[in-house]
Image (tube, helix red, strand yellow):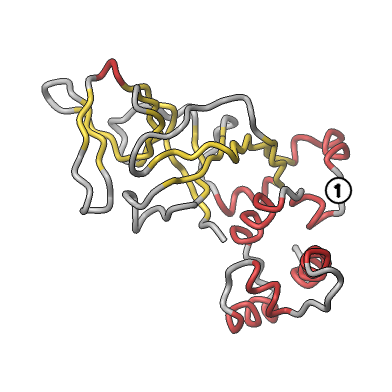
Amino acid sequence: MYEFKPVIEKLKNIISEEKRGLRVFDKDVAKALDIPQATFATMKKRNSIPFKEILAFCAMKKLSINWLFFDQAIDMLAVETEKYFQVRYFSDIRASAGGGAEIFNENYEILSIDRTIMNNILPSKSKEIEAINVDGDSMEPTLQDGSIVFIDRNQTNINKDGIYIASTTAGLFIKRIRQRADGMIELISDNKAYSPETMLAEEIQIVGRVIGNIESL
């Protein structure tokens, strides 16, 4: 069983460095994780660890979550790689929930995450999970602007209900996708203020299906 209190102390040390050595309290950790102070106090008392919020914090600060929980440096992970799940995080890529966005590139970092933690976040068993950011509000309330989304690159069949990342001639989109009877493809927003967009089938390539997300700090 994981212990929350030692993790909190490490988070305090990280925050303290940013505050130039000033004393850091539980309320500062709660604020950094975007958790209400009263909720944080209850979680600490019950040893209930907010994995999603901590993962978002580590991604933003470019920290190893394995170091945070296990004091393991990245080079130590090679000894027992089967215990860890690696996610390619494209921190510079933002899939647009509104207009077009950039396509995938080679600029990514590896998030090495304990499988037990990952299983609390993602239901998928795929080994090809990647993470990018959401840009825009057209998928609200399901996905917020700035959220990190996890993509299963093996799931490209749009006949399965869900949210997909689509690479198009206009850029990268994150939408619900439906193929009409006439062969045209509709990109559908969850925010009803946005009308569906229609494209030819040859103008769109499905990158993968969104299988999880964490909200931005």
The residue under the point 66% across, 57% down is 57
Residue at x 35% of width, y 25% of height: 168
Relative vertical location of residue 69 with respect to residue 209 in this rendering, above or below: below
Q: Position of residue 136 (x, y in %)?
A: 39, 49
Q: Nearer the viewer, residue 180 or 46?
A: 180
Q: Is residue 39 left or right of residue 44?
A: left
Q: Position of residue 4 (x, y in %)?
A: 74, 69
- Residue found 60% across the figure and 49% down from its top: 119
Callout 1, which amino acid? Answer: Gln
- Horizontally, is 216 left or right of 200 in the view? right
Judge left or right: residue 187 versus residue 132.
left
Of 63 and 107, nearer the camera is: 107
Query: In this view of the protein, which residue sits in the foreground, 171 or 189?
Result: 171
Name the residue: 75% across, 50% down: 63
Q: Secondary structure at mark 1?
A: loop
Residue 209 spot, x, y in % from top left: 42, 35
Q: Measuring from the top left, give residue 153's x and y in whole percent.
A: 49, 29
Q: To which residue does mark 1 refer? A: 72
- Image quadrant in which you'd find residue 100: top left
Is 72 placed above or below 27 here? Answer: above
Q: Quadrant of the N terminus?
A: bottom right
Q: Is residue 167 above or below residue 55?
A: above
In the image, farthest residue toward the left: 182
Crowd tier of the residue under label 1, counting other residues whose Cα lies within 10 Å: few below 14, some 14–19, many 20 or above:
few
**Farthest-out residue, top:** 202
